[in-house]
Image (cartoon, helix red, strand yellow):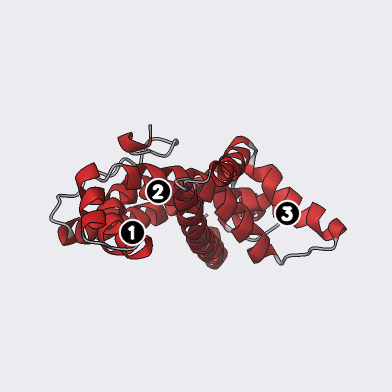
């Protein structure tokens, strides 16, 4: 059994590497979409806010698996074809970006009103106001829920199995006949856990540094709940 496990190790590592790649690509896409939708949701235009709300609720309210399959299999029938990495990145980015948009909106609106009034008194434009004053204070509030989303993205890469992408779950399923289901899936659990802990560590370091820049103490990161934590200011 040990020899079989050692022989299978390169395949486990290859699958883990692919899962990390898709996690990072999806996380970057989700982060960009989170800020775009989150900031647009605070627009003074009721029409723009309405469009953003529809987008957010649609991608939060539909299955990520179906989104994967729709982008990968349906869009090519309409003349739009994506490579597996691009299709997965788009689906993950839109799905988790919809959740992240609420995180961004909640964190930005949680900045004290006095800070907003001070930026107006200083005569700062909207872009400079957001970039230099508001976002530096809001980002430390975003990091804990973003940490949750990052772990959720990692776990969601297991759904790429449906697209026959050779990520960790796919490799495990292929190898379980050689090393046994117990060994294969136990190794998968351990590998996912180790990767998740590494991501959590990175987020905590980022949070500490971000909080230190604005003179705050970082808040504990809740990575247990499956539902992303949204700051109280978003309610």
119 with respect to 159 (left or right): left
Question: N-terminal of the two: label 2 or label 1?
Answer: 2
Q: Quadrant of residue 211?
A: bottom left
Residue depicted at 37% across the width and 38% down the height: 229
In this orientation, does residue 39 appear? yes
Q: Nearer the viewer, mark 3 or mark 1?
A: 1
At mark 1, the secondary structure is: helix
Q: Residues within 10 Å of mark 1 (few under 14, many from 20)?
A: some
Name the residue beneath numbered marker 1. Answer: 130
**Above or below for 214 versus 56:** below
Question: N-terminal of the two: label 3 or label 1?
Answer: 3
Q: CA distance from mark 2 to mark 1?
A: 12 Å
Residue depicted at 68% across the width and 47% down the height: 67
Q: Nearer the viewer, residue 152 or 75?
A: 75
Q: Which mark is residue 104?
A: 2
At mark 3, the secondary structure is: helix
- Residue 144: image location, x then y, percent: 32, 47
- Residue 154: image location, x then y, percent: 49, 52
Q: Which mark is residue 71?
A: 3
**Above or below for 231 versus 14:** above
Q: Residues within 10 Å of mark 3 (few under 14, many from 20)?
A: some
Q: Nearer the viewer, residue 39 or 86?
A: 39
At mark 2, the secondary structure is: helix
């Amino acid at each position: 059994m040990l020899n079989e496990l050692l022989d299978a190790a390169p395949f486990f590592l290859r699958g883990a590497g692919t899962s990390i790649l898709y996690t990072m690509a999806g996380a970057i896409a989700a982060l960009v979409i989170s800020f775009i939708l989150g900031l647009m949701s605070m627009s003074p235009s009721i029409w723009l806010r309405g469009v953003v709300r529809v987008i957010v609720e649609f991608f939060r309210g539909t299955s990520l698996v179906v989104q994967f399959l729709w982008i990968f299999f349906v869009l090519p029938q309409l003349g739009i074809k994506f490579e597996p990495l691009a299709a997965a990145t788009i689906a993950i980015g839109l799905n988790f970006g919809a959740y992240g948009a609420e995180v961004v909106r909640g964190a930005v609106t949680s900045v004290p009103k006095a800070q907003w009034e001070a930026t107006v008194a200083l005569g700062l434009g909207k872009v400079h106001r957001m970039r230099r004053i508001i976002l530096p204070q809001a980002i430390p509030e975003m990091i804990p829920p973003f940490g949750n989303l990052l772990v959720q993205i990692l776990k969601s890469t297991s759904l790429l199995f449906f697209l026959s992408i050779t990520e960790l779950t796919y490799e495990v399923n292929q190898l379980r006949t050689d090393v046994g289901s117990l060994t294969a899936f136990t190794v998968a659990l351990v590998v996912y856990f180790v990767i998740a802990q590494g991501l959590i560590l990175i987020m905590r370091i980022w949070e500490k540094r971000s909080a230190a820049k604005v003179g705050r103490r970082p808040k504990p990161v809740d990575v247990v709940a499956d539902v992303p934590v949204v700051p109280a200011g978003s309610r």
